[in-house]
Image: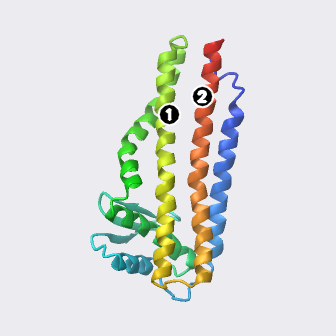
Amino acid sequence: MFPFFYDPYFFLILIGMGLSALASMLVQSTFSRYSNVLSQSNLTGEQAAQAILADQAIHNVTVHAIAGNLTDNYNGQNKTLNLSEATFNQTSVAAIGVAAHEVGHAIQDAQNYVPMRLRARIVPVANLGASLSMPLILLGIFLGMNQMLINIGILAFAAVLVFQVVTLPVEFDASRRAIASLRNQNLLTETELSAVKKVLTAAAFTYIASALSTFLQLLRLVLLFSNRNND
């Protein structure tokens, strides 16, 4: 019988979905709350980013505005720091905190931060694993529960989890660098920095929730197919 018709471990998927939804709600609500708190410096996210880049003597990174809400990112390949509409021209402590976090990635890049380099190397493997894992598992099922194909599919999916785990220290360190830069340059007061920490902690929870969700999916696959194999 097709093993997904009866799945006693499906609750693991639901737990993962719940964690991800909770994390998304938390970051949205926290960012929204502190988007209404304007900084005393009256700096925009873009200005704060430029100030930190200049202080770190990083002159090969350009700052751009992009569409969307919380779509901020740093692209190490073309050295661009992309700030969303909710960040670029906004003077809230939330906007400045998110902008500083992305600059944290630029600083990591400039200083050859090892976890960031490792993550970049894992990206192709993780993308390949995400694309091939389920097709391999399904092929193994249709070929009469071919355990070798199923195991290869599970290992391919595990590559996604490895990528997400490696991502955690990269994100945590970028936030640490952001707080340090904002404090050292007196861009925000200590009270405002406390608010930024809450925003960045909420954002970090999304990465933790994503990794936990992927772990639970991987655990489900291992339990499901190891039990089938034992049967």
Identified by mark 1, the residue type is Phe
Q: Quadrant of residue 128?
A: top left
Between 162 and 76, the one nearer to me in the picture:
162
* Residue at figure coordinates x 69%, y 32% from the top left: 10
Q: Would you say 108 lies left or right of 196 here? A: left
The image position of residue 64, as x and y in percent, is 37, 70
Q: Position of residue 106 (x, y in %)?
A: 37, 66
Residue 73's tag is none
Residue visible at 36% across and 52% down in the picture: 117
Colour style of the rendered protein structure: rainbow
From the viewer's perspective, tell me whether residue 32 is left or right of residue 57.
right
Q: Could you say whether the residue bearing mark 2 is in a helix, strand or loop? A: helix
Q: Which mark is residue 221?
A: 2
Give the mark, 2 or 1, whose residue is nearer the N terminus.
1
Is residue 209 in view from this perspective?
yes
Residue 157 numbered mark, or none: 1
The location of residue 38, given as percent across then percent down, is 58, 84
Q: How many neighbours does mark 1 have within 10 angstroms: few (below 14), some (14-19), or many (20 or more)?
A: many
Element type where label 1 sits in the image: helix
Q: Amino acid at mark 2?
A: Leu
Q: Residue 116's spot in the image, x, y percent?
A: 39, 54
Residue at (40% x, 77% y) in the render: 52
Contact (CB < 8 A) between labels 2 and 1? yes
Of 166 and 67, the residue lying toward us = 166
Is 36 located above or below residue 15 in the figure?
below
- Front one among 125 and 184: 184
Q: Quadrant of residue 121?
A: top left
Q: Is residue 89 visible?
A: no
83 to 222, vertically: above or below: below
Report the residue at 72% width, 26% height from top.
8
**Rendered image quadrant of residue 229:** top right
